[in-house]
Image (cartoon, helix red, strand yellow):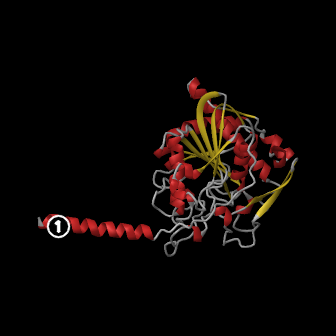
Amino acid sequence: MAKNRRMRAAGSFMGVFVAIALAQVQIPKIAPATHDVRPGPGVKVKRLSDYFSGIARTPGDTAVYIMEGAEPGGTVLVAGGTHANEIGGSMAAIVLVEKARVERGRLIVIPYANNSAITYQDPARPGGPRSFEVKTAGGERIFSIGARLTRPEHQGEADPPGTKAASHDSAMEISPRDLDRQYPGKADGNLTQRIAYAVVALLKKENVDLAFDLHEAPPGSRLAMMIVANPKNAELGAEAVLVLEAEGLAMKLEESSATFRGLSHREWGDATRAKAFLFETPNPASRRESPGDPVSDGVWPLAKRVGIHLKAIGAILGAYNEAAEDKGRIRIGNLPELEEITKAGLGAYLR
């Protein structure tokens, strides 16, 4: 009996401790940022909070766009804006929302996966641009440039002492505000962990077959022009790389690390049925020394980087469809070729 009382007392103490710990994570109730995204015909709009209510009415909630073809098939997810300063991924996602025509299966797009980070300026680059303009047939449009990390005051808790933003090549310094280090997330965690949890919940609920996380890296870095694949779908990535090379686009392939955890391509693929990939295109503004123009660089203009993301998605879709059963195939049309968008400019493929 005394042992039972001790156990009940210990359980009560732990319950109080957990309640106190959770109370310390106070996610602010702030309306999430909105963006100039103009969906094409038939595009349905949901919220990430529809998949996990724990981010509802917080800065982490964001728009989710769903396109469904006339024929049933597989489902693909494309996420941009995991790091909100890597604008090539967000703009490729927006081109999909505004111009893609899904003929078979479903396409789900999240242009701003970390919607808190888009409201925040990278403290390492205080003088960097906060937005950019794109001229379209319908007029000039303005898009935001954010930071790599969740805005500190949105996180719900302070960073641990000594925390620094992780570099592209190091697993040693992991920021709890880096969405691409926090998968599969926590339902009762800080804001970044809750966003990660919501994305994984979406992958599961929508039975996603293929998932792409679109990123950018400094030109000349190890990651620039790379596809990173979960080990279970590395062979599919290799087939796509061969196709891209034959078409004149050289991209490297790397498998997700078995020990560096928390990244989308690793955790999406391990936690769900999805075949998960991450792409890295070269963004001149990501250089630590002498950062370049993120939009109009002479070697890596934004339009070209967007075209590379779309071309890589198409190559993996092609390889996937060759191996998939007829009922699981995915066909997406009306997308620009790399050469077309590079020559005509990004605005030619926006509404």
Q: Amino acid at mark 1?
A: Arg
Res. 247 visible in picture:
yes
Q: Nearer the viewer, residue 114 or 216?
A: 114
If the image is split into quadrants, where does the C terminus sit? top right
Image: 67 above or below 170: above
Q: Is residue 182 visible?
A: no
Q: Quadrant of residue 131?
A: bottom right
Residue 59 x %, y %:
61, 62
Residue at screen point 28% across, 70% down: 13
Q: Which residue is mark 1?
A: 5
Image coordinates of residue 19 in percent, x first then y, are: 38, 67
Secondary element at image label 1: helix
Q: Position of residue 312 (x, y in %)?
A: 68, 41
The answer to whether 2 appears left or right of 273 in the picture is left
* Extreme-left residue of the structure: 1
| Count of labels in the image | 1
Looking at the picture, tell me which residue is in the foreground, 49 or 75.
49
Q: Quadrant of the N terminus?
A: bottom left
Q: Residue at x 54, y 48 (%)?
A: 265
Q: Is residue 135 above or below residue 174?
A: above
